[in-house]
Image (cartoon, helix red, strand yellow):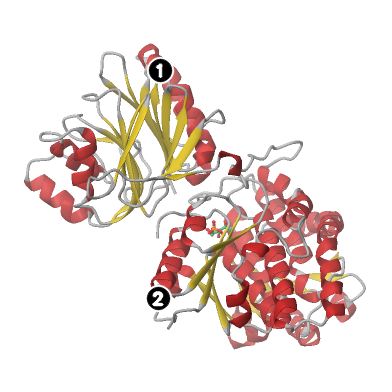
């Protein structure tokens, strides 16, 4: 969360910084700002509430816009508010009370309250409600004795939390200093110029090289040189990043939103992800000896990735005979999960940066577990935490709500489960072959699901789009899909919704149902379809209106119970989440659009959740 960029070099940099912030805007869009060091070594700071478009407008109207345009050192920030409401005062860059440093920070300074109290007692005057401002004051004070890099290194020792920050000072106008702890920060090299950024995607295309910083390393950048010191002040060896590993930004095409473009792109994303099937990309790299010998696997993830993990559990249990536990990363890491040396822990995170998932994997590794990662972003933080990495190839997902990354995660988990089933001898040859064919058919199945859903979903959105509440029901493999459908509706259409295991409904949530309450039932083929039919009848008997997602040729009694029926093409029942989620994504999008909302940038959310 929050995107940061920095530039030092020979070119005017305001446009370079704005371009970088635009590419990082999915990390937060509450406010944005830049600080530029002008030729006369004064720092010019411009901030605006809203996104980069608002910042651009403010810059264009700025009385010192000419000086701003010529600056050759600068930093920028796009904010997702953690401490302090959304306001210009709380927008970054932040500065100390003597204007000696400008800083942009991503993450959280956990001991900010005690540091603030101490600094105030020493006479500091604070201008924002943020946790990050303490860093500006600390670094500025350390500048009394040290240069900028040493001031940052000293300040770092007093900070607790997880963060990355970049500092510029008019006292050293040709230098930028950056550091990180558990939040990402990368260095980019160009001809006579250097960059810092939260992710490679925020840096320009024409880089000649890139490096990743490790925890508590401090990088000093000048136009022609980079020096990195470890926390003890000794020269550090940084890791090179492969520039080819960058994933492309999507284009909108003729679609009304990126979210809709990405829903439409799912068949291609699946095809790319499965192109090396039946083994699947990255599967060859896995520690097969440990996987085959393993008695259990723990999956940790957040949000939509957690829902993919729930599908993965069913796949791995059924096809590979593996005992699988799935947990929300932010819960699991603070429990006592009794992980032992040799246990397998898989983190699923499309961004590869989610703080809680990474924290959970670190906990697992510290207990001696074998750590695996499944992500969509090559070179992301999670790829550095894991001993083996599975890569989906969904391309960059611009819409904040996950769509194509979910289906590719499920497909890759299925490829893994199948391969593991073969290796462990739990899948007979003929069954393995049939499932291999089913995996290959998934792109076509997803495409057909979208075509079949468009009209009934448009009718459903028209009919129920103003409902104050939706209930989603599913059982077995339908439950993660129901959870995902409800999450999408909350996220992009802001409609309160709940998802429940259909068999559990009568233990409470059935009390929510009244005449005309919309209930979405994920009733695709599953081993418990008959049981689900009874649950749907119970819902109808209470006057609820049913939108059923069912499998073509197997809709049976569900069709009679449904007020609106969406048929999706058949596939193996455990792969049905891929076609079944498509109508639910479209439903959330259609309602969001009808309510005049921006589905790509839902309020309060960010694409990359780097705070715990
Ligand atoms: C939902 C959504 C979020 C993410 C969650 C985890 O549409 O996008 O719930 O799934 O923040 O993100 P990753 O997968 O990047 O760890």
For the C terminus, the quadrant is bottom left
Report the side of 542 relative to 443 (left or right).
Answer: left
Q: Is residue 598 above or below residue 174?
A: below
Mark 1 Cα within 10 Å, few/some/many (few <14, many 20+)? Answer: some
The residue indicated by pointer 1 is 10
- Tag 2, which secondary structure? loop
In percent of width and height, residue 575 lies at 77, 70
Mark 2 / mark 1, whichever is N-terminal: 1
- Tag 1, which secondary structure? loop
Q: Which one is nearer the viewer's eye here, 610 or 342? A: 342
Seen at 20% across and 35% down, the residue is 96
Q: Which one is nearer the viewer's eye here, 354 or 60? A: 354
Mark 2 Cα within 10 Å, few/some/many (few <14, many 20+)? Answer: some
Q: Quadrant of residue 258?
A: top right
The residue indicated by pointer 2 is 367
Q: Quadrant of residue 445?
A: bottom right
Seen at 38% across and 74% down, the residue is 334
The answer to whether mark 2 is within 8 Å of ligand 1 is: no
Q: Is residue 565 visible?
A: no
Seen at 79% across and 71% down, the residue is 548
In percent of width and height, residue 131 lies at 27, 49
The residue lying furthest to the left in this view is 122
Q: Is residue 75 visible?
A: yes
């Amino acid at each position: 969360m929050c995107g940061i960029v920095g530039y030092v070099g020979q070119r005017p940099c305001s446009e370079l910084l704005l371009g970088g912030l635009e590419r990082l805007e999915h990390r937060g869009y509450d406010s944005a700002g830049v600080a530029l060091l002008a030729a006369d070594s004064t720092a010019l700071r411009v901030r605006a509430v809203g996104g980069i478009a608002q910042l651009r407008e403010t810059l264009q109207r700025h009385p010192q816009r000419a000086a701003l345009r010529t600056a050759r050192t600068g930093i920028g920030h796009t904010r997702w508010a953690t401490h302090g409401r959304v306001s210009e005062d709380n927008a970054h860059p932040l500065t100390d009370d003597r204007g000696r440093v400008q800083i942009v920070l991503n993450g959280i300074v956990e001991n900010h309250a005690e540091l603030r109290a101490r600094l105030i007692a020493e006479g500091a005057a604070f201008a924002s409600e943020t946790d990050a401002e303490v860093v500006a004051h600390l670094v500025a004070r350390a500048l009394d004795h040290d240069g900028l890099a040493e001031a940052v290194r000293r300040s770092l020792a007093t900070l607790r939390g997880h963060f990355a920050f970049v500092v510029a000072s008019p006292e050293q106008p040709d230098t930028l200093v950056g550091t990180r702890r558990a939040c990402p920060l990368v260095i980019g090299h160009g001809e006579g110029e250097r960059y810092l950024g939260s992710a490679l995607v925020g840096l320009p295309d024409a880089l000649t090289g890139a490096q990743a910083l490790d925890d508590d390393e401090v990088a000093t950048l000048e136009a022609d040189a980079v020096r990195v010191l470890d926390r003890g002040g000794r020269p550090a060896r940084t890791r090179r990043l492969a520039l080819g590993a960058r994933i492309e930004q999507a284009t909108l095409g003729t679609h009304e939103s990126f979210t809709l473009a990405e829903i439409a792109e799912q068949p291609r994303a699946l095809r790319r992800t499965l192109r090396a099937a039946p083994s699947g990309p990255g599967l060859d790299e896995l520690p097969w000896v440990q996987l085959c010998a393993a008695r259990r696997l723990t999956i940790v993830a957040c949000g939509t990735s957690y829902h993919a993990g729930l599908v993965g559990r069913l796949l791995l249990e059924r096809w590979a005979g593996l005992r699988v536990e799935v947990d929300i990363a932010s819960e699991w890491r603070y429990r006592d999960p009794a992980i032992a040396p040799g246990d397998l822990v898989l983190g699923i995170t499309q961004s590869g940066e989610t703080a809680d998932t990474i924290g959970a994997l670190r906990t697992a590794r510290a207990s001696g577990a074998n750590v695996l990662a499944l992500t969509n972003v090559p070179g992301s933080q999670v790829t550095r935490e894991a001993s083996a990495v599975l890569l989906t190839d969904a391309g960059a997902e611009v819409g904040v709500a996950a769509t194509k990354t979910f289906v590719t995660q499920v497909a890759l988990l299925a490829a893994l489960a199948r391969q593991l089933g073969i290796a462990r001898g739990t899948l007979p040859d003929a069954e393995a072959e049939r499932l291999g064919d089913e995996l290959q058919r998934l792109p076509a199945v997803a495409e057909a699901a979208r075509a079949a859903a468009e009209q009934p979903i448009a009718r459903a959105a028209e009919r129920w789009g103003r409902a104050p509440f939706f209930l989603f029901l599913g059982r077995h493999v339908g439950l993660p899909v129901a959870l995902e459908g409800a999450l999408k509706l909350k996220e992009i259409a802001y409609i309160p919704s709940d998802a429940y295991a259909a068999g559990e409904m009568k233990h409470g949530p059935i009390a929510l149902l009244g005449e005309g309450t919309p209930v979405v039932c994920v009733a695709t083929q599953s081993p418990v379809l008959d049981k689900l039919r009874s649950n749907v009848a119970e819902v109808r008997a209470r006057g609820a209106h049913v939108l059923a997602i069912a499998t073509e040729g197997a809709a049976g009694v569900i069709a009679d119970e449904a007020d609106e029926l969406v048929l999706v093409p058949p596939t193996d029942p455990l792969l049905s989440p891929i076609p079944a989620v498509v109508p639910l994504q479209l439903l959330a999008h259609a309602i969001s659009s009808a309510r005049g909302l921006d589905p790509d940038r839902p309020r309060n959310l960010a694409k990359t959740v780097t705070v715990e």
